[in-house]
Amino acid sequence: MALFQPNNPVLNEKTFREAALKSTDNSMTVKGTANKTAFLLALVICAAVYSWGVLAREGNVMPFLLLGGIGGFVLAIIISFKKEWAPYLSPAYALAEGLFLGVISAMYSSLYDGIVLQAVGLTFGTAVAMLVLYRTGVLRATAKFRAIVYTATAGIAVFYLIALVLRLFSVDIPFLHEGSMIGIIFSLVVVAIAALNLILNFDMIEQGAAQGAPKYFEWYAAFGLLVVLVWLYLEILRLLSKLNRR
């Protein structure tokens, strides 16, 4: 009987079921996952503060953009396929993302005063709100809910990929970056989809702990949450920048 569909590319039922077959008495717990998520977030913040400081002092942050952006992407792909490596690679991923986010955040901050603190606050506020909605049963990861969120997420990923390819040929999709009403509505939709992905992650973590996934899956689940939180933060940052332009 399929309790949920394998829709989340990082956390899904098949992933936990296969891991549970190899599990020992030292199994995954929700508390352990929460602790590791907090640790990874601390690494992101430390790396972001460092790269922001380098930008302020030296101005040459291209290595951080390359290391953080490309390095983080490569690490995410490796972790997705080699889940047992998550305890070792997840901290490296967090540091890479922190270096990247520090530079991006500093650039936005130079254009719009206070935007970074607003984005950080809204990101964590949204995450807490999603957790409350999940724990109270207002939002549940039903099969239909998963299908809708996964389809929307895949659609956004394809759209961004097309936009990236077009930009290589100096063709921009106007509403993707401009502060028009269409651009703001688009960003609101993307932020909402990113937030709803947290519900899927919360459910997968709970199910993984219930099914006795191995201890290293706490790192893998924490990595999955971090991926969504980074995406949510960047989308909120983009949305706030559009609102500031109006």
Image: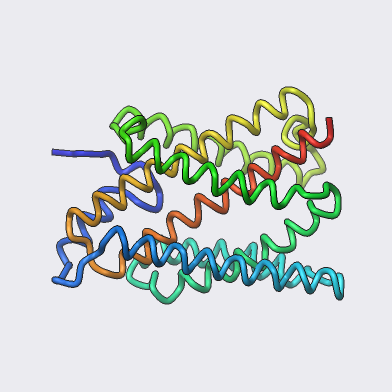
Q: Which quadrant would the C terminus be assigned to in this image? A: top right
Quarter containing the N terminus: top left
Q: Give the residue drawn at x 43%, y 34%.
A: 149
- 42 on left or right of 245: left
Left or right: 1 as drawn, with respect to 231: left
Nearest the eye: 172 or 141: 141
Q: In this view, which residue lies farthest toward the top?
A: 181
Q: Residue at x 45, y 37 (%)?
A: 196
Q: Residue at x 79, y 51 (%)?
A: 108
Snapshot colouring: rainbow
**Vertical side of 184 occupied by 10: above or below:** below
Task: Identify the image quadrant of residue 134.
Answer: top left
Residue 104 vertical placement versus 239 (above, below): below
Write the residue at 69% across / 46% down. 118
Front residue of this view, candidates 112 and 68: 112
Quadrant for residue 166, please give it.
top right
Relative vertical location of residue 196 with respect to residue 114 in this rendering, above or below = above
The percent coordinates of residue 215 (x first, y second) are 26, 69
Q: Residue 177: where, in percent of width, then height?
A: 76, 37
Where residue 244 sits: x, y (%)?
A: 81, 37
Expressed as whole percent of the image width and height from the top left, the position of residue 93 reads 53, 68
- Please indicate whether residue 226 sits to the left or right of residue 24 in the image: right
Q: How many marks?
A: 0
